[in-house]
Image: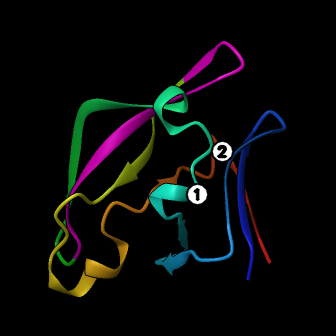
Amino acid sequence: MHAKASVDGTVIAETDNYQFVEGNVYFPPDSIKDASKTLTTTSHTTHCPWKGDSSYYDIHVGGKTLNNAAWYYPKPLEKATHIKDHVAFYKNKVNIEKE
């Protein structure tokens, strides 16, 4: 199974080793293209009762910034340890293709 995330035609993540949770593709950290340039952490957080506290990234592509468009779980709860540090993207901001 293959998954790809892109913004305006620019691929920002691609992998054959993703996790699919609650309708979202979670990309492993090493599948993010130029992560140090593409993603910057924000102060935004949310909480999921079974996954834990999520942290967010802004996405920077082609001179554009998508605020809080990606999230990850740096310290997931026990049932979500398989997605630790994996990155998911808001489908209304990032194009996700999954085969």
Please check the rendered image and state whether residue 54 is part of the magenta-colored stretch, yes or no.
yes
Identity of the residue drawn at 33% across and 60% down: 85
Dividing the picture into quarters, in which one does residue 40 lie? Answer: top left
Q: Is residue 25 left or right of residue 40?
A: right
Q: Nearer the viewer, mark 2 or mark 1?
A: 1
Identity of the residue drawn at 46% across and 77% down: 22
What predominant SS class does the magenta segment belong to?
A: strand
Mark 1 or mark 2, which is nearer the start of the sequence?
1
Name the one closer to the observer, 19 or 68: 19
Identity of the residue drawn at 27% across and 60% down: 73
Please say if 17 is above or below 75.
below
Find residue 84 and name its label.
Answer: none
Q: Amino acid at mark 1?
A: Ser
Q: Residue 53: where, in percent of width, then height? A: 17, 58
Query: Which residue of the protein is positioned furthest toward the bottom in this rendering?
Result: 79
Q: Which residues are magenta?
A: 51-65
User: Dividing the image into 4 quarters, which one contains the C terminus?
Assistant: bottom right
Please check the rendered image and state whether residue 30 is part of the magenta-colored stretch, yes or no.
no
- Is residue 67 among the parts visible in the rendering? no
Q: Is residue 39 left or right of residue 51?
A: right
* Residue receiving disc 1: 31
* Mark 2 neighbour density, 10 Å: few (under 14) some (14–19) many (20 or more): many
Find residue 94 and name its label.
Answer: 2
Dividing the picture into quarters, in which one does residue 47 lie? Answer: bottom left
